[in-house]
Image: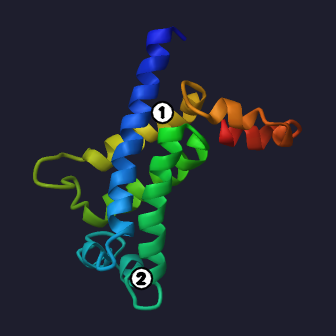
Amino acid sequence: MTLSQKISLAVVRIVMGLMFFYAGITKVVNPEWTAAGYMKGAKNFVGMYEWFSSPGILPIVDFLNAWGLTLLGVALILGIAVRLGAFFGVIMMLMYYFVILDFPYPNAHAFIVDEHIIYSAVLVFLGLVGAGRYFGLGYWFSSLPIFSNRRSVRKILG
């Protein structure tokens, strides 16, 4: 991989990280924020999203949503656990996508593909190429002695 490709990959990773971090941290610091309104408008898997928005489950969903986005952003910005973050990020993006999808129109300005699918595709790409190894802390972190005999853990963190 050329230097310009590595730099481009790092820039995409960091920009995506900033976007996810901002989306998450604004939810974390706002005690009034909840995902209930978004889920109540579900057009697919209505029963599942109704269950997610039930009073006993909603606080867990809100916590996982806000902190998941925040930590995904941190992982991408720092380049640590990019593969793990990307995996869970894709799951989150698909959950957001299916709640609004009125097939084949996810919104008024899209046909099948909207921003959630684009974010998912970018996250898959970043995870597959191990983007944290390029100008991120992933390579250094996975090379620590504690992980020397744990190849699978190094692969997730790197």
What is the x, y in percent for residue 7?
45, 19
Mark 1: which amino acid?
Phe
Alpha-carbon span between mark 2 and mark 1: 31 Å
What is the x, y in percent for residue 65?
43, 66
Kindly check if marks 2 and 1 are in contact, taking CB atoms under 8 A apart as contact: no
Q: Secondary structure at mark 1?
A: helix
Q: Residue at x 48, y 51 (%)?
A: 72
The image's mark for residue 125 is 1
What is the x, y in percent for residue 98?
33, 61
Q: Residue at x 42, y 35 (%)?
A: 14
The image's mark for residue 58 is 2
Left or right of 144? Residue 18 is left
Instruction: Give neighbour class at mark 2: few <14, some 14-19, many 20+ (Cα, 10 Å).
Output: some
Q: Is residue 93 above or below residue 155?
A: below
Q: Residue at x 50, y 55 (%)?
A: 71
Q: Secondary structure at mark 2?
A: helix
What is the x, y in percent for residue 16?
38, 40
- The residue mark sitting in front, 2 or 1, is 2
